[in-house]
Amino acid sequence: MERKKTVLLVMGSSRAGRICPKITAWVAGIGRAFTDFVYEVVDLADWPLPMDDEPAIPALGPYTQAHTRAWSDKIRSADAVIFVTPQYNWGYPAGLKNAIDHLYREWHDKPAVIVTYGGHGGGKCAEQLRQVAGAVKMRVMATAPGITLAEAVIRQGAPFDPDRDFTQHMESLQNALAELADQINAVNAS
């Protein structure tokens, strides 16, 4: 029996009080309903990756730190990645950049979707993340859902329900997941 394809949902925020887990769970739920892949949430808060603690640049390797080798194994085990990240000051969080920069070859040719959220939906964040993903040779899907959050959710921590509040983003997310599925299946067919 062929193993099911695995999609890692990498949560871009490790900030205290974050809403990233709730949004990531919503994306995972849509993915599970929409495709036949395994969706695994990866919380960067659970992956302590100190900045610049490897003696060689990631493209040259080998990795000497146990945490880097474990991170490498995790990313290598996936068939695809979905980055779910907030937009901070027009960019994406430093922890996510560090997690990407810790590796190099593991990202090569990996299909990826970028899902952003924020007061403006996260388009500028997605542009920057797309450039970095391209630099490590990921295949980023054209559709990048940008979820616009209400000011009260961002500033006052107001409650929200993704199933109710994100209906206008459902089509974009499904399109991105369809593109991702096509890429995963294309790799499997070749």
Image (spheres, rainbow, N blue to C red):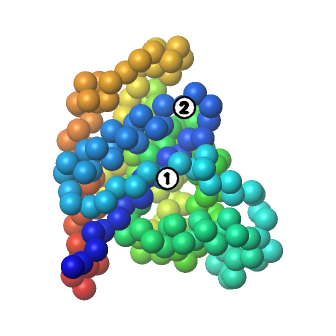
The image quadrant where one finds the C terminus is bottom left
- Decide which of 139, 38 is in the foreground and name it: 38
List x then y, in percent, for residue 121: 41, 34
Q: Amino acid at mark 1?
A: Val
Q: On screen, 32 above or below 87?
A: below
User: Which secondary structure lies at badge 2?
Assistant: loop
Q: Quadrant of residue 139?
A: bottom left
- Decide which of 50, 60 is in the foreground and name it: 50
User: Which secondary structure lies at badge 1?
Assistant: strand
Q: Tell me the residue that label 1 is attached to.
A: 42
Q: Amino acid at mark 2?
A: Arg
Residue at image x 50%, y 67%?
Answer: 75
**Along the horizontal axis of the image, is 60 left or right of 20?**
right
- Decide which of 38, 99 is in the foreground and name it: 38
Q: On screen, 154 above or below 92?
A: above
Label 2, label 1: how far apart the Cα atoms are: 15 Å
The earlier-in-sequence mark between 2 and 1 is 2
Q: Is residue 40 visible?
A: yes
Residue at image x 25%, y 24%?
Answer: 164
Q: On screen, 6 above or below 159?
A: below
Q: Tell me the residue that label 2 is attached to.
A: 18
